[in-house]
Amino acid sequence: MSQQDMKIAIVGLGGMGDWHRNLIESIDGLTLAGIYDIKEERQEYAREKNVKVYDSFEELLGDNSVELCLIATPNDLHKPLAIAAMKAGKNVVSEKPVTLSSADLQEMIEASKETGMLFTVHQNRRWDEDFLTMKKIYKESRLGEVFRIESRVHGSRGIPGDWRQEKEHGGGMVLDWGVHLLDQILLMMEGVKLKKVYTTMTYVTNQLVDDGFTASLLFENGTEVIVEVGTSNFVNLPRWYMLGSNGTAIIEDWSLKGEIVSAKGQNEKDVVPVITAAGLTKTMAPRREDTIAKAELPVVKSDIRDFYRNVMKTIRGEEEIIVKLPEVARVMRLMEALFESAEKKQVIDFE
Ligand code: NAD
């Protein structure tokens, strides 16, 4: 730690707050000043790690050495805590989802404008290598004209049995995982209007909040995107599946196992039909290996510490913030469109 280090305080040292604590330790120029958590047990845990524990949120806000505040509490508390921190002269990083509605987000944005404090959101999955790799394939038109993208995360354990099951705390999978996947898709399709949204939601393990959803997003250029989150899936579908006029890209799982497959040479002749118990098909017959080209994924590497490096440089006036509030607001509006579509069982016009 040096005199010039930027000091950050963490509000809410749960699972994710602790992940940040670890990350912060590995970032040059950033030092953890201390934490505040309402739970005695989490305060004790912090002391065991030799981390200063503030007695109250007010005490934390009163520490003039703290320039930056991370809010990592349950979702419904992001808004009041972030606004109070900005009003106390702190720059703020809020965990995702930034809050529960566009109206609430507007209040947070106003607080940032009034106080001049930086306010941004930890959309860390922008640095996921599976996403960055698929974005590169899309942007470089490696599949020709892309007409369909499918982005999925599947688990089989339902929603974790905490505040994530309660609506008033901002529970449910749209706000939990949807916020990441939708943010990724809007970045990938940057500059293209999203025209229509249709969504269905599941309530398999929980009646109060969605434990999964499938959203169909139709963009102005004709690309259809499926975004799906499931928590009752004992067999997973691929994390990414992208179809273009010249080929298909797939990423199977978190390990980035996948490939790009495209047609090679002339159109295949003399297709051998597949014969099933009840018929035959040439159309759906698998390709012969000598008629396709298989390429490795152009894997894009990332360093999640760049999130905080960008926040620090933005505060110092040296860079532009990566996670911008208008982007956060667009994702929030999109999540609201998903809820509206599922409730009305209708297609919603978006932009
Ligand atoms: P958690 O329940 O493990 O932790 C929340 C902590 O906040 C608890 O320790 C709780 O005691 C504390 N808390 C509650 N009210 C407080 C208050 N008023 N003041 C101070 N502390 C308070 O939850 P979590 O999994 O750590 O999630 C926290 C946030 O992080 C959520 O917004 C969640 O969506 C987000 N999150 C983000 C990612 C990501 O990849 N970006 C992953 C997991 C969670």
Image (cartoon, helix red, strand yellow):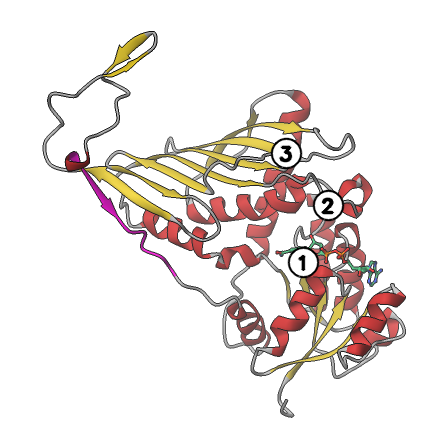
Residue located 26% across and 46% down the image = 142
Residue that badge 3 annotates: 232
Q: Which of the numbered marks, if any, corresponds to residue 160?
A: 2
Question: In terms of depth relative to the viewer, which is nearer, 306 or 220?
Answer: 306
Location of residue 234 by image quarter: top right
Between label 1 and label 2, give the one nearer the viewer: 2
Location of residue 311 by image quarter: bottom right
User: Considering the numbered disc 3 on the image, is that residue within a helix, a strand or a loop?
Assistant: loop
Examine the rendered structure and indicate whether residue 71 appears above or below residue 60.
Answer: above
Which three-letter amino acid code belongs to the residue tagged 2? Pro
Q: Is residue 57 left or right of residue 31?
A: right
Residue located 62% across and 91% down the image = 2
Q: Which residues are magenta?
A: 291-300
Between label 1 and label 3, give the one nearer the viewer: 3
Any part of residue 190 in sight: no
- Which one is earlier in the sequence, the residue at label 1 or at label 3? 1
Q: Position of residue 342 (x, y in %)?
A: 64, 26
